[in-house]
Image (cartoon, helix red, strand yellow):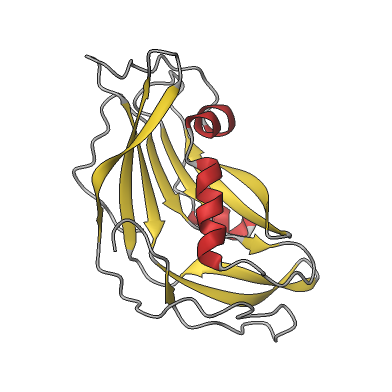
Amino acid sequence: MKKYTNILVALGVTLFLLIVGMKSEAEALCPTGYSTKTINMNVGGCIYEFEICYKCSPLGAGATKVQLGTTPTLITPGCVPTVPFNQVIDYILSQIQTPAFLFSEICIFNPNIPPCDGPPPPYLVTFYLPQCWQAEVIYYFGSNTIYFSPCSEDYCETTYSICVDGSGNKIMTALLPSIGSTPSCSGQEPPIPFINPSYPPHTKTPCYIYHTPCD
């Protein structure tokens, strides 16, 4: 992952989104000192497995960092994708980019989140979204399946604030603008079905763009 500078971390949670699929690769790609969590999610009738890398502050304070890996691997034997990959990632993000998921599944504590009307600054959560992707047929636990992974070092960085409104609800708001590089890939995702587990291992699609707030 590229190094990003000047990231606001005051009284917040920094969340990095990187994509790793199989457990062995997740363990190799997670930063030193981070733990991993495996998540399975059904999207369009196929089960996708992805890894979450995280490192939470023991005090539940601003030093907490989480690196989410969402490079999905299809683990339903023989399942052929019926949902475009962009929609798969959109759905996964809709489930994990929430205060409920962050504080119940990743960093399990009950922080004293500041009120939305201040004056304490809100918690900050930063996601890094890969902008260029590729699908590949791999041999996975005895059968062929499809593995999705970034095919460049282009990332989109989006920071969210978390605060509590007058009704006690945790509110997560994107802080604009998002920061990112110009994607080195320009191709669009191939139409469904663009790749099939019946293809020989190591069959790959061209590198294609995942549209983020940065493009």
Note whether residue 20 is visible: no
Q: In the image, is residue 108 above or below residue 114?
A: below
Question: Taking 26 as reference, is 32 left or right?
Answer: left
- Residue at position x 56%, y 74% in the image: 135
Query: Which of these two is toward me, 22 or 163?
Result: 163
Outermost residue on the left side: it is 6
Above or below: residue 199 compared with residue 17? below
Q: Quadrant of residue 151?
A: bottom left
The structure residue drawn at horizontal position 48% and vertical position 83%, both measured from the top left corner, is 206
In the rendered image, the vertical position of residue 36 relative to residue 164, given as above or below = below
From this view, report whether residue 161 is shown above or below residue 197: above
**x 43%, y 50%: residue:** 17
> Residue 18 vs residue 48: left or right?
left
Q: Position of residue 78 (x, y in %)?
A: 78, 72
Kindly indicate the quadrant of the structure image that contains residue 212: bottom left
Measured as percent of width and height from the top left, residue 185 is found at 35, 77
- Residue depicted at x 40% and y 80%: 187
Number of numbered discs present?
Answer: 0
Q: Position of residue 40 (x, y in %)?
A: 68, 49
Which of these two is toward me, 207 or 25? 207
Identify the image quadrant of the N terminus. Answer: bottom left
Q: Is 43 displayed left or right of 9 in the figure?
A: right
Residue 148 visible to an observer of this rendering: yes
Question: What percent of the width, then of the height, locates residue 62?
Answer: 34, 25
Quadrant in which the C terminus appears: bottom left
